[in-house]
Amino acid sequence: MTMPASAAGPSARDVIREWAALPRRGVIFDFNGTLSDDEPILLEIYTELFAEHLGWQMTAAEYYGTLAGRSDREIVETAVAERAGGDPGLAEYLLRRRREMYQRVVAVRSPITEAAAGLVGRLAAERVPVGIVTGAERSDVRCVLDSSPVGEHIAALVALEDVTEGKPDPEGYLLGARALGLDAGQILVFEDSIPGIAAAAAAGMRCVAVTSTHGADQLSGITTALVPRLEAALLDV
C-alpha cells in the first residue's frame, strides 16, 4: 500500500522499518477513530445528546475541529461548560446516556474493521505485545473488544479511569509502555488525533497517524508519518 509522509515528517515505511529493527518492541493503539472505526458513531451520539439537552446543533466540523481526540469526559464537560454553565449533574447524566447509547450500537456491529483486526492478528503472530491507550471509558472498550477477535491479543489497556491527565499529556502512553514491560523508545503508536499524536511525541514514542479523523491536509503541519488506514500490509517493510 502507499504510505505517504506528511509535509514535515518521515514516511510511515521508514518509521515502521526503524521500529521493526529493534530487538524488543511493542505497539500501542489509540482506540476511538484508530483501532475502532467509531468516530462517526460518537459524532451521531454527541450531536443527538447536545441538541436535546444543550440546545446546541453541533456540526461535524465543530466536533472534528475541537472535540474529537479528547476524552469522553472532556468532550462532555467542555460542551456543558460552554452551553449550560458547567452543571456537573448534567455532565454526569450525559456521560451515562452516551455510554448506554454507544454500547447499544457497538453490541450490534463491531466498529473494528477486518483490516485492522488483521494487523493486530499479525502482530500477535509475530509475538509483538499490543496495548491500547485511550480517553474512552474502560467499559466502552471492553464492550467492543469482547465481541471482536482482537480482544484476545490486547495485553494492556489504559483507559479514561487510569489517568489523571488526558492526551496531549503523555501519562497514558507512559503507563501503557510500562504495562507492556517496555521503554518508550520501543513503542510504535498508531493515532488519529492531534492531541494523541502530541501525547505520543511527548512520551518519546514513534508514531504513525491514521488519516481517518483528520485528513492528510489537516495533519500536513504535524511532524509524523501518515497512513490512510490500518492493515497488516503496513508491516511489509
Image: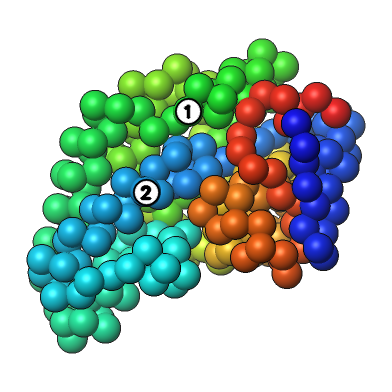
How many neighbours does mark 2 have within 10 angstroms: few (below 14), some (14-19), or many (20 or more)? few
The residue at the point 47 percent across, 59 percent down is: 69
At numbered mark 2, what does the secondary structure look like: helix, strand or loop?
helix
The residue at the point 12 percent across, 61 percent down is: 93
Q: Is residue 126 left or right of residue 143?
A: right
Colouring mode (rainbow / by chain / secondary structure / one colour): rainbow
The residue at the point 16 percent across, 68 percent down is: 51
Question: Between residues 154 and 2, which one lies in front from this camera angle?
Answer: 2
Question: Between residues 232 and 72, which one lies in front from this camera angle?
Answer: 232
Relative to 43, say whether 139 is above or below: above
Contact? badges 2 and 1 (CB < 8 Å):
no
Relative to 9, say whether 185 is above or below: above
Of labels 2 and 1, earlier in sequence is 2
Q: Quadrant of residue 142?
A: top left
The residue at the point 69 percent across, 34 percent down is: 26
At numbered mark 1, what does the secondary structure look like: helix, strand or loop?
loop
Q: Quadrant of the N terminus?
A: top right
Q: Position of residue 19 (x, y in %)?
A: 82, 38
Q: Position of residue 122 (x, y in %)?
A: 66, 18
Q: Quadrant of the C terminus?
A: top right
Q: Is residue 164 left or right of residue 185?
A: left
**Label 2, label 1: how far apart the Cα atoms are:** 14 Å
Number of the label disc, if any, that sits on residue 40:
2
On the question of residue 74 being in view, the answer is: no
- Please, what is the three-letter code of the amino acid marked with disc 1? Thr
How many neighbours does mark 1 have within 10 angstroms: few (below 14), some (14-19), or many (20 or more)? some
- Please, what is the three-letter code of the amino acid marked with disc 2? Pro
Q: Is residue 58 left or right of residue 128?
A: left
Number of the label disc, if any, that sits on residue 129:
none
Relative to 217, say whether 228 is above or below: above
Residue, disc 1: 113
Q: Position of residue 28 (x, y in %)?
A: 61, 40
